[in-house]
């Protein structure tokens, strides 16, 4: 199984990267091939709503020739999409938002003259999030947005792992949070391959 990890933090060694690492360790230990794409610094232009993408139902297409073509290809080659982002102003960071906008139009052919298919129907989506406020107040809108995004696109939403950042002078990844991240990784393995749970996690 392939997992495409899109990361939205500008800080390569930041909290979101720290919380994502144990999840990926568990996934890779379970035989999942994980490919991480750091969105910051990539050329991801905002959707301009030209709707040229709606005329071609054969794949992701866009008149903007930037890094989104390669990113969409990675998404299409994966069964699991893991979106890892810090919360900025109650939602994801700008490059993650731009990527989601490009994917929702580029892969859902719903918005042209005739309603077409979702080209990524059935893929699974999970979130790793870090935020300064309690996750119930910091990450709730992001999670709700992604839930609706998934329902609309015919994707299966698997859940969110959220860690709270209590300050730049504190240890972010506590042993308890690391255990939570590992448990989240195991849950993803089981949800992506239910026969694994029957085999006792092997
Ligand atoms: C510009 C900016 C906006 C932020 N907005 C929020 C917010 O709306 N809610 C929240 O809980 N935390 C917010 N935070 C805190 C970050 O989500 C938190 O520090 C996060 O752990 C940073 O992750 P990173 O180290 O991976 O970049 C914000 C931080 C920045 C820099």
Image: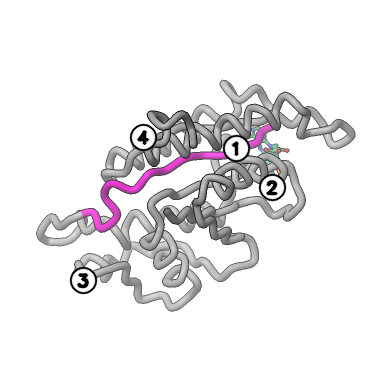
Whether residues under marks 2 and 1 lie with C-beta atoms below 8 angstroms apart, the answer is: no
Cα distance, mark 2 to mark 1? 10 Å
Percent position (x, y) of residue 201?
A: 48, 33
Where disc 1 sits, the SS reads strand
Identify the mark nearer the N-term, 2 or 1: 2
Q: Write down the residue under mark 1.
A: 129
Cβ of mark 2 under 8 A from ligand 1: yes
The tag on residue 2 is none
Chain part drawn in magenta: 118-132
Q: Does residue 103 appear left or right of residue 40 in this picture? A: left
Residue nearest the observer in this picture, 95 or 78: 78
Identify the mark nearer the N-term, 2 or 3: 2
Where disc 3 sits, the SS reads loop
Identify the mark nearer the N-term, 4 or 2: 2
Whether residues under marks 2 and 3 lie with C-beta atoms below 8 angstroms apart, the answer is: no
Q: Residue at x 73, y 55 (%)?
A: 12
Q: Write down the residue under mark 2.
A: 17
Q: Residue furthest left?
A: 114
Q: Write down the residue under mark 3.
A: 56
Q: Write down the residue under mark 4.
A: 194
Mark 4 packing: few (<14 Cα in 10 Å), some, or many (20+)? few
């Amino acid at each position: 199984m392939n997992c495409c990890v899109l990361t939205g933090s500008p800080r390569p060694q930041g909290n979101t990267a720290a919380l994502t690492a144990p999840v990926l360790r568990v996934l890779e230990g379970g035989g999942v091939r994980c490919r991480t794409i750091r969105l910051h610094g990539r050329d991801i232009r905002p959707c301009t709503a030209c709707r040229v993408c709606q005329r071609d139902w054969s794949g992701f297409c866009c008149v903007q020739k930037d890094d989104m073509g390669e990113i969409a290809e990675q998404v299409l080659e994966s069964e699991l999409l893991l979106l890892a982002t810090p919360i900025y102003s109650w939602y994801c960071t700008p490059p993650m938002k731009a990527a989601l906008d490009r994917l929702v139009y580029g892969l859902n052919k719903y918005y042209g003259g005739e309603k077409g298919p979702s080209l990524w129907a059935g893929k699974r989506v999970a979130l790793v999030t870090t935020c300064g406020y309690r996750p119930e107040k910091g990450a709730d809108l992001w999670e709700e947005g992604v839930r609706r995004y998934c329902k609309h696109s015919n994707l299966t939403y698997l859940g969110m792992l959220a860690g709270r950042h209590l300050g730049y002078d504190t240890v972010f990844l506590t042993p308890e949070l690391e255990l939570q991240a590992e448990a989240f990784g195991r849950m993803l393995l089981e949800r992506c391959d239910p026969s694994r749970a029957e085999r006792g996690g092997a």
